[in-house]
Image: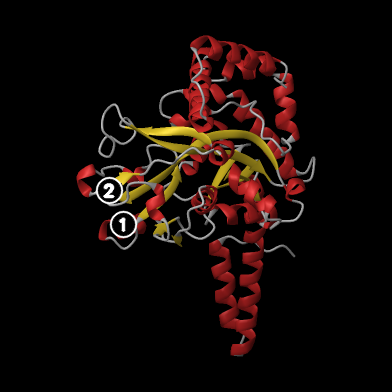
Amino acid sequence: MALCTDTTVFRRLRHIVLQCVPHVAAWVAVIVWLTGVSAGTAGAADLRVDAANNKGVVELETGGSSGTSIRVAEDLAGIVNDGATRRVLPVVGTSAVQNIWDLALLRGIDMAIVQADVLDGVRQQRALPGIENNFTYITKLYNEEFHLLARAEIKTIADLANQKVNVGVRGSGTGVTAGRLFELLAIPFKPVNDSQELALEKLRKGEIAAMAYVAGKPASVFQGLRREDGLHFIPIPLNPSVANAYVPTSLTAADYPGLIANNQSVDTVAVGTVLAVANLVPDSERYRNVRNFVDVFFTEFKSLLEPGHHPMWREVNLAAELPGWRRFAPAAQWLDRNAAVAAKQNPQSPQDIKTLFARFLDARQEVVGGTPLTDRQKQELYDQFQQWQSGHSR
């Protein structure tokens, strides 16, 4: 016999039971049974709603709320979500290393934004056996700058030998990058694992000598700081090992007007980030959801370059390769089908690329020494680079 679960009818049934059943234990049992029928019917309805709500959902794990990746995830959600069949659900992770483990082992995490050097570090340390088979990538994303803020008495990074330097919470991307940089520069230091906000307070009080932070410039934690506070950015020297591991870049007054004087800059390095994908079963629901995500993301990429989105999108080249890692098959297939479209979506003009190439040559020349290259020599090398690039466009 089917029971109506309308609230009024249910109350009437309960009233009848209370009137007709003389034993307390009996009427309690009946009420519990009736309640269970009601809850079970409601549960079935909830399951139907739940299936609809989960349609097309992809979970994207990011870094902390003060970093760049959460903003980037919000931008992705803005162009992908359609309210019915597609939805990006950002999940704030605890640390860069933990995010990689989550992507490999945690139920429901489909994608994650991770630092390239953290991925390489996990692979080199064999912390996650067979990591190459656990992940693919959709695209390389933006670069994030390595910031090293210190007290006035610290003039160079060498002055931080055996000093306390905050590198973020345990397992953070900053910790991985800082550890690798100090090792490449042969400078021992004492790592401290506090949040960046707490580290800034400790730095002001003199409890630590410096704080490191990998974030897209300008990082919000440094906004409002002034040279009068007794704090400044320390340059990162570009020896051959550092230049081979990271991309040379700089911090300028445009990024941090309170800390860097006009017409001055601070040399540092940039760390690449990657949109990585879990090892999903081909043609499974989750696989199809990520495939649909890729199609919308790549097709609508140009809209991310418009005002209102994070400026880091202007650094992204969808076709850029990540050496040593496999691209997610639907992403590779989209790029093969739409090579001309992808080329037009590259936000960097030929002149921008040529300028960056010239800056790269200058930075490398400072490292290796020797006679500076002439403009003609730079042009010849750039022409060779273009010829090489045309042969490796796929």
Q: Is residue 250 left or right of residue 84?
A: left
Q: Residue at x 77, y 44 (%)?
A: 284
Say whether residue 28 is left or right of residue 185. Answer: right
Nearer to us in this view, 67 or 45: 67
Residue contact at pointers 2 and 1, CB within 8 angstroms: yes
Does residue 196 show up? Answer: no
Quadrant assignment for the N terminus: bottom right
x and y percentages locating residue 222 in the rendered image: 32, 44
Q: Residues within 10 Å of mark 1 (few under 14, many from 20)?
A: many
Question: Can residue 354 be seen from the camera position used here?
Answer: yes
Label 2 – label 1 distance at C-alpha: 8 Å
Q: Which residue position holds label 1?
A: 203
Q: Please tell me which residue is depicted at 31% across the width and 63% down the height of the picture.
A: 207
Looking at the image, residue 353 lies above or below residue 255: above
- Amino acid under disc 2: Leu
Out of 113 and 289, give the one closest to the viewer: 113
Residue identifier under label 2: 231
Q: Give the residue at x 50% y 42%.
A: 69
Image quadrant in which the C terminus is located: top right
The residue under label 1 is which amino acid type?
Answer: Leu
Position of residue 357 in the picture relative to residue 231 (left or right): right
Q: Earlier in the sequence, mark 2 or mark 1?
A: 1
Count of labels in the image = 2
Which residue does the image show at 66% across and 61% down from the upper left?
A: 41
